[in-house]
Image (cartoon, helix red, strand yellow):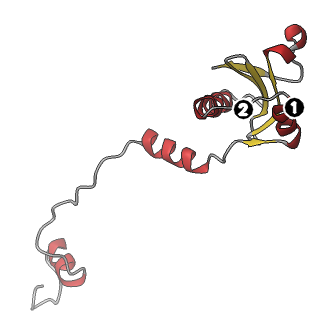
Amino acid sequence: MDKLTNRFTSIEQVTGKYLKTTGGTAAVQKPQISFEEILRNKQSEQMPELKFSKHASMRLEERHISLTTEQNERLENGVAKASEKGIKDSLVMIDSLAFIVNVPNRTVVTAMDQTEQQDNIFTNIDGAVIV
């Protein structure tokens, strides 16, 4: 600061006096994370678990269908793919099993195996995923 005019002669003097900086102007380096990585992390945090409706649970029990862990993961992946494509009601085929899923609610509406798929006609769906 210029003592005679009581003014600062440079911006560095102002920042040094009022902002209490520590000598250097070195930028703090943060690890670089891509936008895509952040988005995927947030989406996976917000993905609720896949649910089975009462009707679907009854059908699984009646038809003696039990999903393995691997099949359940494939079903989850199929629902995620349907969601990415904007499908609302999807047929998800896994091995010889067929599931009708309400994608926005992440709810399996009904399930059937190959012996129950009469005429291989599925209605009220707007997309299909074969996993």
Relative height, residue 34 to residue 68 (above, below)? below
Residue receiving disc 2: 66
Three-letter amino acid code of the residue under disc 2: Ser
Q: Which residue appears farthest toward the front when viewing the image?
A: 64
User: Where's the C terminus, which quadrant?
Assistant: top right
Relative height, residue 6 to residue 83 (above, below)? below
- Residue 23, given in percent of the width and then of the height, sits at 11, 73
Relative height, residue 39 to residue 100 (above, below)? below
Relative height, residue 14 to residue 55 (above, below)? below
- Residue 7, given in percent of the width and then of the height, sits at 18, 84
- Residue 126, given in percent of the width and then of the height, sits at 80, 22
- Residue found at x 77% / y 22%: 98
Question: Tag 1: Cα neighbours inside 10 Å, few (<14), some, or many (≥20)?
Answer: few
Q: Is residue 27 left or right of residue 87?
A: left
How many angstroms separate mark 1 from mark 2 (CA)? Answer: 11 Å
Residue receiving disc 1: 62
Q: Are marks 1 and 2 in contact (CB under 8 Å)?
A: no
Three-letter amino acid code of the residue under disc 1: Glu
User: Where's the N terminus, which quadrant?
Assistant: bottom left
Task: Tell me where residue 64 sits by quadrant.
Answer: top right
Q: What is the secondary structure assignment of the residue under circle 1?
A: helix
Q: Is residue 116 left or right of residue 86?
A: right
Q: Is residue 30 left or right of residue 55?
A: left
Q: Is residue 44 left or right of residue 97?
A: left
- Residue 123, given in percent of the width and then of the height, sits at 89, 19
Q: What is the secondary structure assignment of the residue under circle 2?
A: loop
- Residue found at x 81% / y 33%: 60
- Residue found at x 89% / y 38%: 55
Task: Tell me where residue 111 sits by quadrant.
Answer: top right
Residue toward you, 38 or 56: 56
